[in-house]
Image (tube, grey):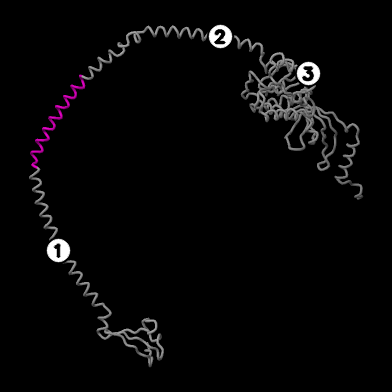
Amino acid sequence: MQREKYLTVTALTKYISKKFTFDPYLEKVFLVGEISNFRLRERHQYFSLKDENSKINAVMFQSNFKRIKFEPEDGMKVLVTGRIEVYAQTGQYQINIESMQPDGVGALYQAYEQLKEKLAKEGLFSQPKRPLVKFPKRIAVITSPSGAVIRDIITTTRRRYPIVQLVLFPAEVQGEYAKDSLVARLKEINARGDFDTIIIGRGGGSIEDLWPFNEEEVARAIAASKIPVISSVGHETDTTLSDLAADVRAATPTAAAELATPVLTDEIIKLKNYQVQLVNYLKNLIEVKRKQLSKIQQSYIFTQPERLYEKYVQRLDLLETRLKNNFEKRLLIQKHRLSLLINKLNELLPEKKIHELQHQLVNYKKQLVTLTKNQIAKQELLFQQKIKLLDALSPTKVMGRGFSYVTETENQQVVRSVSELSINKNLCVHLKDGTATVKVMEIRKEEK
């Protein structure tokens, strides 16, 4: 058997891979299919494309995936462009996708609908709208400095409300950097906080031209603005996510300026009308009050003021009579009670009660003297007994029976054992009627 005729799996896979690589028909393939097994990953995307009868693995690297404007979903039919290659580790062929767009619907429109649905579910478009300031002092305009938008806004505001101050914040409104430029301008204006209204917009164009106003970051920045925002993007038929997120949508830049400002001449006329109405109202009010005053002056309160208190005088007399009757009645009751108390007091004979209490006091005094003498005698007897007991226990009594105790002559400590003695040591012997100094001549220790 000639083993060299047999290829390794790796060698065969490499050969097939080179065939795929150098085949000009597989270098750029345009493929239509339905997305299957898609799961959004942080970097590269791996899924499948299928139709009624077949399926092919697909990979789309991060650099290419970032360029698409919609989010792929299972079951979505797409148009893809890429190259066919072999993945050596599994030996399977796959399509490496370079671009992808929905089949039948533009990619930008698909992205617009997906993002619109997402933000709507979050409630971004339905949150309470900020009311526009009726008489703004300063208006910030975010748009291109060279477009017709700013000219239309300047012309309209000068005609309607020339006292307002317009401040242009130049921004990119088209292209790759427009999104960041618009968001930065919105944040800058809100950080300053000295504007009453913001107008953001641009002129008409294709969906690609208007796309920066459909970016999620721009819509969120508009919704988060603390200052009311008027969005005027494209033509009247164009509706961007910025329009939905703004507090007010204007069909044109001119309409935006009209929404942001009143007509000064109309307001002046209104003020003059209000002034005339106020003067007429005050005149009518003064006339009504004058008639009321005249009517009050003719009232009996001023013509016959004594009638005001006639009823009160009569009521006072009635109350005074009632008070007098009640007082006399209560006085009789109190006199009767006092008479009863005097009778009870006489029945108690307080002099007799005092005599009895004095007699009890003398008896209590005699009892107290007797008890005190008995207690003193008892305590004296107990005291004598304790003296005798103490005398019996006294050391001098014991020494009177021939006992003594020995101390050292130097420190007067009591000697309790022969172990504390030494030959020729001076000791002091304490007797009943005095002391004697002795010297140790011999020491004998008793055996136990």
Marks 2, 3: nearer the viewer: 2
Crowd rating for badge 1 (residues with CA inside 10 Å; few <14, some 14–19, many 20+) = few
- Give the alpha-carbon distance from disc 3 to disc 1, as whole Å: 130 Å
Judge from the rendering whether residue 344 lies leftward or rightward of residue 194; answer left or right.
left
Q: Is residue 48 magenta?
A: no
Contact between marks 2 and 3 (CB within 8 A): the answer is no
Residue depicted at 16% across the width and 24% down the height: 328
User: For the stretch drawn in magenta, what is the main secondary structure?
Assistant: helix
Foreground pick, 446 / 362: 362
Q: Are marks 3 and 1 in contact (CB under 8 Å)?
A: no
Q: Which mark is residue 148?
A: 3
Q: Which residue is mark 2?
A: 277
Q: Secondary structure at mark 1?
A: helix
Residue 373 disc label: 1
- Residue 151 in percent (x, y) is at 77, 18
The residue range painted magenta reads: 321-349
Q: Is residue 332 above or below residue 263?
A: below
